[in-house]
Image: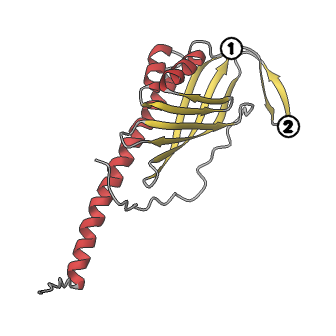
Amino acid sequence: MTIAILVITGSELSQLNTIQNNQCCSCYDRNRQKAISIGAQITTALNLLSTDPTSSTALFTAPFAPDGVWSTTVGNVFGKSNVMAFYASYAFNPGETNQTIVTHQNYWDGKTSTLSLQRNWTATITAPRQFTNLTNNTIDFYPVNFTYTQDDFVIIRFNCLFEIVYYREYFDSVQAVSFYTEDYETPCLPCYFPLYCLS
């Protein structure tokens, strides 16, 4: 019996590691850009709410998987068709106008295919509504045409086809003034090396 032994020098191993790392980094960057592009599509949809609710609804819903879940402050919505109906119920009767969303930060987790978005939501109310009064920290009714800005954080989980399987948005519905700041350290985004890369 002949036993073949493959000897890899330290230099060769270093070269193999470099090739693998470059491939995985390329995969990481490619998937991150796909996710950020879909996040930008969601932002575009929301910014169309006051001018074109039909296009807004279609654009928001398009990336969802057939069995995707939208987890909201009032419960979970299951399935793409139900997500579309739920979104449309707001889009065509929102009780506010001039909706504007600004994304400040994107955070990508390549291991779980999860995108997180740090955003601000601004809108002008068309009916009296309750918000927190920062002067005395009470909940008061604010008049028509009051414009509020809320801090908004979204978690989006993708499947292998980069369809949205889970969408969760966090915000304080009575917040009137944003507390967003960029006065913190820049997040570190290390390259993640998965066992395989999505094409």
User: Left of 73 or right of it: where is 119?
Assistant: left
SS for callout 1: loop
Question: What is the spatial separation of the Cα atoms under label 1 and label 2, in whole angstroms?
Answer: 23 Å
Looking at the picture, tell me which residue is in the foreground, 138 or 12: 12
Q: Inspect the image, locate mark 1, and give the three-letter code of the amino acid beneath it.
A: Thr
Q: Residue furthest front?
A: 1
Colour convention: secondary structure
Residue in the picture at 37% in, 43% down: 160
Residue in the picture at 62% in, 47% down: 181
Instruction: Name the mark on residue 126.
Output: 1
Instruction: Name the mark on residue 137.
Output: 2
SS for callout 2: loop
- Quadrant of the rendered image containing residue 34: top left
The image shows residue 113, relative to residue 166, as above or below, that is below
Residue in the picture at 82% in, 22% down: 141
In x, y percent, where is residue 25? Answer: 32, 59
Q: Inspect the image, locate mark 2, and give the three-letter code of the amino acid beneath it.
A: Asn
